[in-house]
Image (cartoon, coloured by chain):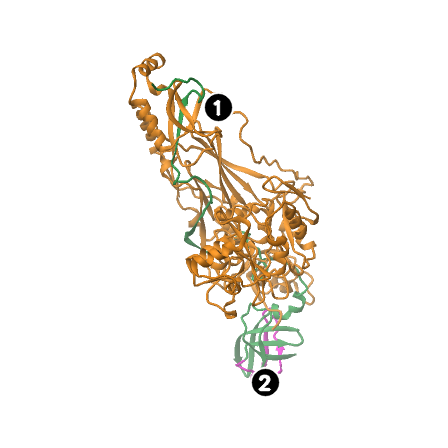
Amino acid sequence: MQIKLNNGIQIDIPIIESGSPTKAISNYTFTNEPIFYYKRGYDVCHFGVLSSFMDELDALNNPYPNGETVYQIVYQGLTNFHHELSYYTTGTGKAYIDNLLAHGVWVMGSFDTGGIMMVKVGNKYAFVSWQAILTYIENPDMYIYNFGCTCSGSGSSERGTFSKTELTNAALGWHTDISEDIVPLYIWYTPDGYSWAYVSSFANILGEYTSIWTNTGTIQEAMRDSSYIQDILGDYYPKQPFLPYTGSTYDRTAGRTLIGGSGNQPNYRRAADINIYGGSKIDDDLNPYGNGGLLTTSGGGGKFSKNSDQGGWTEEDQFATDALNSGFFTLYNPTKGEVQSFNDFLFTDITDSMATQLKKLVSNPLDYVVFMSMCHFSPEIASGGKQPIKYCGIDSGVSANVVADQYKLIDCGTVYIDESDETGSYLSYNPYMTCHLYLPYIGMIEMNIDDVMDAYINVRYWIDLLTGSCIAQIISKRPTRSYGDTDNSIGIVIGEYTGNCYLNLPLSATDWRGLFSSVVQFAGGLTALAGGSASGLGSIASAVMTEKTHVSRSGQIGSNYGYMGYQKPYFLFERPVVAIPENWGEYEGYPSNMIDALTKYKGYTEVEDDGMWTNGINGATDQECDLIRQVFAGGVLLNWEV
Amino acid sequence: MQLTYYNNLSDKRYLNKNITAITHAGNPVTIKLLDDTNIITPTFKMAEKDLYMTANYCYVDDLHRYYYIESVTVSNGFAFLNCALDVLMTYKQELAERAPLVKRSENKYNLYQVDDQMKLLNYKAVKRVEFSGGFDKNKQEFMLCVIGNTTGGDESAD
């Protein structure tokens, strides 16, 4: 299997298991041989033996001390290097750190960019994350354990469960530029009380400490889309590191998925099933619909097409030809000082010869200035350094960076809206739950929550730097509840909205009048849509909720307004609040619509009176059969064992 | 026909009743089923001395059925028990073999079906989820577009 590294090098490593993430995990028998996970496509992954991958990396001449490989380092296990380092280095605080850095080597990244440093301690090695080093500098009373974990105090009694801070430091300290295609499957974790080679899966971190992150997910979701993890950790974590795995058989059937064995490795837990029914849980295994509800045969014997017309979105390169290549005009990205200098050139110290030339060429000097604007992003700069601003063929004496490409892409990242973090029920969908998306320079748009729930939503802006026009594309990838031939590796554009992201600077009196005119046009953008109750919703108890007034949250946000507005997209969700007691199920039950033996049911049970299900009860008269159905239709309490 | 008295402590909706037989030498008692009565809501006649006022539940052996004792009347030395059939307790064994369509359940359910009995508050909870990227307010870049290219003309300002 070819794996492409970020530096363009292709390496070839054997793959030991392939398939969808869940299939590959369930098929593979884990041993003590560390493996890594390699993602290809959206839901297909491959597992490789880590040592093979490490060997290939070693062949690329990575800087390890004494000829050891990273694989060997990790497999040997690590230790509390602070305790041992006290015999190895001297000094406290900054001096200690200086000694530390002097004896280590950056395995990944650097001190400036962040990464992981390896330090040799006696005949063992320790890994320290950059974040942990910074933490130690800030709090020299803390001891640094391996892999970016920090614990207070000293001695074995302090080696307890890692705190959120320690985990956060470990996660934030990671940085790698090895390969974008490698996704963390699991990090090796062996806290045996004295040797702490701490690592943990990022999915585990996300799952156990949900308050740290905006979004959390399961390991399956993390493996499906590595960009999800990337977005979660933001600027601290631009690439995904590879990570070894050691453990015993993967148990997918347990409510808590155990990864690893012998008590040395933490249990992986799914993100908490948070729902508002106070103790009730979703019983997906008993859902008879599942994927079978999406039929390929209609009632009349016809067949639905399993093919979906996706209109997917793929990565696009910069346009091959743009207006900037025409040579008719040049787009500069000057600094504030350069703008001032150019202004001086235009309106001060005009010599006679220059004035003569200008009279021959133009009537208004500003005719040659197409526009000047401000923006909240940096354009791509052409190579070759700063170029003189040529005005009417005259070198203004002011140099500025030249913009390389006419179109710029701003990727705002991806968020995953996990339905299990909402209500875990029908209340997470339209019309009960609502969703608005704020787009900079565009405004607040109302979205269909059904398009967003359980989907990876990516927002990106294409900007025409010549005009400031921007188009925001909302791209959805939905790993679940897709069917047919839907390729989940391709996002689907579910909305496009336009705006302008320049703050236009008027350069003349005419410009000012035009600017005011365009601003006034946007001023009346706020509208309120009264009423708007949804029809066909009388079946829910609180019909008042659905008849609430719909109010627009923003008008059109034009360029000048948008420049002052919030600069990052965000979702605004509104979900209903259930008003039921915790043991409501005992009194009213929950919607079932299942057919199964009555012995499978416990507690409150309501049965559909179809006039037939009691037929043939031994010894019962017709009248008694009717009575039985009547009693069950009103709700009974099944207690098979008394 | 024999009637066995019980004390029932369970809600009528329960399938299995928590019943305790009345411990008395005279339990069970001999009864007669009145004429023009039915087995759903029968009236049983017995000697007044066989009446136990602490009982609220009974089992009639010849009928093989359990009954709630709804009311009791006494007249002319006889006691009359007005009863109602408990179909759940009577047919619980047969019901165990049935597999009907269950509309609502306490333990087997799918919350993604619309629940018309759900009660909601009249306000909603709000959550904000921000994207990690976007524009940067800390960047204030100038964009200046000028006619001509950087190589055309070479006249200096002076």
Residue span colored magenta: B27-54
Q: Which residue is drawn at 51% across and 59% down?
A: A149
Q: Residue under circle 2?
A: B23
Extreme top residue here? A360
Query: Is residue A321 rendered magenta in the image?
Result: no
For badge 1, the amino acid type reads Ala
* Crowding near the residue tagged with mark 2, few <14, some 14–19, many ≥20 C-alpha atoms within 10 Å: few
**Badge 1: few (under 14), some or many (20 or more) residues near its Cα, within 10 Å?**
few
Report helix, strand or loop for mark 1: helix
Residue A595 location, x and y as percent?
64, 57
Residue A314 at least partly seen = yes
| CA gap, disc 1 and disc 2 | 102 Å
Tell me the colour chain B is drawn in: green
Q: Which of marks 1 and 2 is in front?
A: 1
- What colour denotes chain A? orange
| Amino acid at circle 2 | Thr
Q: Position of residue A79 (x, y in %)?
A: 56, 63
- In screen coordinates, is A146 left or right of A9? left
